Image: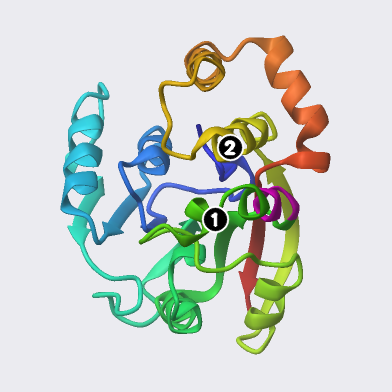
Amino acid sequence: MLTVDFNKLNLRPGTTVLDAGCGSGRHLRGLAGIPGVKYFGIDTKQEDLDKAASSLNEIPGVEADNCQIQKADIRQLPFADAFFDCVICSEVLEHIPEHGQALSELVRVLKPEGALVISVPRYFPERICWFLSRAYRNEEGGHVRIYKKDEIPNMLKGHGFKCWKINYKHALHSPYWWLKCLVGHKNEENLLVKYYKKFLEWDIMSKPFWVRSVEELFNPVMGKSIVFYFRKG
């Protein structure tokens, strides 16, 4: 389930891409399918990095030399200034109290004219989750803030960035999280939660056209994630 649309980024052979906060590697697996792209993944959780590396090894034809995965903190990236052509940061900033410091690091390692893609939970669906469940909003390591639509673009204006595209994604996931917040956000035994999760997993694996079409229709209304595409300079 990709949040970032790589087709919008025109990634060519030799392009260097950072996935900052790569988790278990969902976007790294997408980058692995683009010929000649050199991609880097960082995260603070070694367990997730191990899963990412393992899943990439299972993809036929992946060039090991084009991929580098390492443990690192987004607030202090171990890369030189202007190192990457493209930086992705998907569903990470909402977890970080020092989000300004993290954004400054993403800006620092990006080349002039480079592309920066940031996704965070959308205000309206996330606000419903916070309203429904105190435990959800107070979970350790969870979301520490809800972003309004103009907040991240305004933070990056001072760094010379222009937002040229905004997308909304994962509308079908919003009701799932609302349901979980209603019954207990860690309650995996509820029958509605179980069956909705199976439906989402089936959709991710099978990608039926009619379900994809329904989600695209509802994304502008209740997409769980908002995705910003920026250009530096």
Residue located beneath label 1 in the image: 134
Quarter location, residue 173: top right
In this rendered view, identify the residue nearer to me: 175 or 76.
Answer: 175
Q: Position of residue 68 (x, y in %)?
A: 21, 53
Q: Which residues are magenta?
A: 124-128
In this rendered view, identify the residue nearer to me: 44 or 62.
Answer: 44
Q: Position of residue 25 (x, y in %)?
A: 33, 41
Q: Amino acid at mark 1?
A: Arg
Residue 177: image tag: 2
> Could you classify mark 2 by the number of other residues whose Cα lies within 10 Å: few (under 14), some (14-19), or many (20 or more)?
many
Q: Is residue 53 left or right of residue 39?
A: left
Residue 221 versus residue 188 in the image, above or below: below
In this rendered view, identify the residue nearer to me: 154 or 80.
Answer: 154
Quarter location, residue 58: top left
Q: Provide the major secondary structure of the magenta segment.
A: helix
Residue at 49 percent across and 38 percent down: it is: 184
Element on which disc 1 rests: helix
Residue 193 appears in view: yes
Q: Amino acid at mark 2?
A: Trp
Q: Report the Cα–Cα distance between label 2 and label 1.
A: 13 Å
